[in-house]
Amino acid sequence: MSENRVPEDDEGTVLFRVPLPKDPGALKGLAPLIIKHHYEIDYIHSYAQDSPFFAGLANQRLLGTRCGSCNYTYGTPRAHCMECGRPCDWVDLPQEGQIHTFTVCHYGSEEFLKETPYILALIEFPGVDTLFLTRVVGLDPQASSLDWIGMRVKARFRRLSTFRPTDVYFVPIGT
Amino acid sequence: MRPVYAVSGGVSKFARARPDLDFRGMVKEAYDYALTDLHLTPQHAREIVDGTICSYFSDHFTRQLKAGSMVQDYLGLCPKPGKRIEGGGATGGLAVQSGWEAVASGRFDICVVYGFETMSRVNTWKGNEFIALASDTNFDYPVGGFYSGYYAMMVVRHMKEFGTTVEQMALVSVKNHRNALHNPYAQKRREITIEDVRRAEMVAWPLTMLDICVMSDGAAVLILCSEDGLNTLHRATGRTPLPAKITGVGGGLDAMRMADRPHGEVILLPHERPEDYRGLKYPGVHSFRAGRTAAKAAYQMAGITNPLEELDFIELHDAYTSSEIQTYEDMGLCRYGEGGKFVEGGMPFMPAVDYGVHFPEQGRIPINPSGGLIACGHPVGATGIMQGVFALWQLQGSIRAHFGSDVLQVKNARRGAIHSHAGTGTYVVISILERGD
Ligand SMILES: [Zn+2]
């Protein structure tokens, strides 16, 4: 943001009355009225068939799934196989893997702005066909480099579960 | 299937905010422009239009469900049939193809495809949150995932795999902003350099504010006709518009979670060989399998075997400079991995515009002559339709009439493509348009 400017936010003035010209012909020139409209909601969200994954995190287990038919192994679980449509079984994933790709988020959705900068990465695991999206902690966000790809990382779990995918995060091995 | 023609279009100028008009008013603005271009009065249109396709992405931004019904009555097109199409960032392109289906099938002879988005109604980062809800809300969004972050991860892998550079990405931004200087419909019209792009604020490494399209309010309308529809228009106006024929449509989807994308074999286009890609794991997170699938189908239908030789221009979905480069490859303008070199060589630039950079092969196939999403803005439901309008004007040779200058007119444009793309390549559609004479 440029330094010679007052930061803008969404706050405005509460206005109860507004002048109006008597002549209806002048109304097309009226500036648009802009009001603030609040909207908030709590959803009752079931993790449904994905639930064991979140229960696993609360017990220091990182769970994926494996297709009982074609053996395709999912690093992010899904209850049915994307390759053959058969039901999958839950399996423990290795808790060590390597960074497949990453980014450093200097901005984000409003909900996560207060946590920036943070590192997102897709992790690959040996013997697993798909990846897992997670935060990486313990690298300097200002020192991002393609050399981070291939770095070996291991899972760490929050002691107090929030039952969100951030109950697990990854750190470089050796730190 | 019957032949389908685009005959007229209009764009309500994309802007950061349009507090003076709501979504109905913006669509009406674009609709009236399209009718005027046909010399058709709204009263006449009301008699001869058979139905509509409505395009908008996000109920969160609109916070008015069934907004399509409200547009329909505002345009005076009740009680004619219509429906809403939604497919993330590709919504507009999908709507154009739905309009094509309605006409090709024989259901409608004259179909109005309209789209809009009203993104100024929340702040930018709340807007990013709304868009991020178009990613898996169990596994991706709650980790802090948002779209710039996802695309950043994709291009980081592209950089690692193929050696693509941030300077090559910045060139896309230079091109699209510079083109937009000559497009009065564009939201951002700036002369910028590679250094400006790299010095801009970092959003998600390595993507800066100038690698990423902005949020917009805006609307667009494209009118599609059968041959019978062309005759009806002629009877109503005494004129025959110069149409563009839609000769190819293709689409594809991919897994919502990037983590789920396979690492298999490249889907080949007719001019490619398996040995071009030995050892490349595809699509991974570096390429868009849905984009390649869409291209393959659209080219096959249009009879295109070498797109670089057989297309005169493309309006493609450059939500990110990186995704424009990745899309060159998906669309087979160069091989996978060569997108960075393709832009560095100058191929996708306009041949006669000065970009302040010397290129060995400038202007081989202009990509985003309009300035693309990066400069025109991206009011999601309108974007793909805007591309259709700009493509029609290119093929009509009417850019001067609509832009007030022919700097961006692709000379003797006979065949072009429009490409619409939703989040991380989950929905991609490509349509081929050709001069109808
Ligand atoms: Zn299977």
Image (spheres, grey):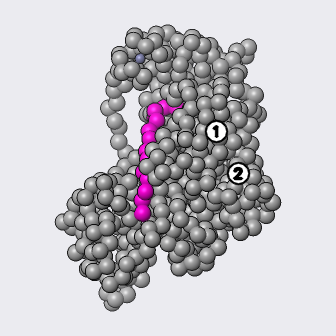
- Near mark 1 (Cα within 10 A), the count class, few <14, some 14-19 or many ≥20, is many
| Residue located beneath label 2 in the image | B343
Q: Which residues are magenta?
A: B245-258
- The x and y percentages for residue B349 are 68, 60
- Residue at image point 33% right, 26% down: A46
- The x and y percentages for residue B72 are 27, 65
| Number of dots carrying numbers | 2
Quarter holding ligand 1: top left
- The x and y percentages for residue B163 are 74, 37
- Near mark 2 (Cα within 10 A), the count class, few <14, some 14-19 or many ≥20, is many
Q: Is residue B242 above or below residue B372?
A: below
Counting residues from the N terminus, which is met first, the one under dot 1 or under dot 2?
1
Q: Is mark 2 within 8 Å of ligand 1?
A: no
Magenta residue check for B248? yes
* Residue B46 appearing in the image: yes
Residue B22 picture quarter: bottom left
- The x and y percentages for residue B97 are 38, 54
Q: Is residue B380 left or right of residue A26?
A: right
State which chain disc 2 sits on.
Answer: B
- Residue at image point 50% right, 72% down: B396
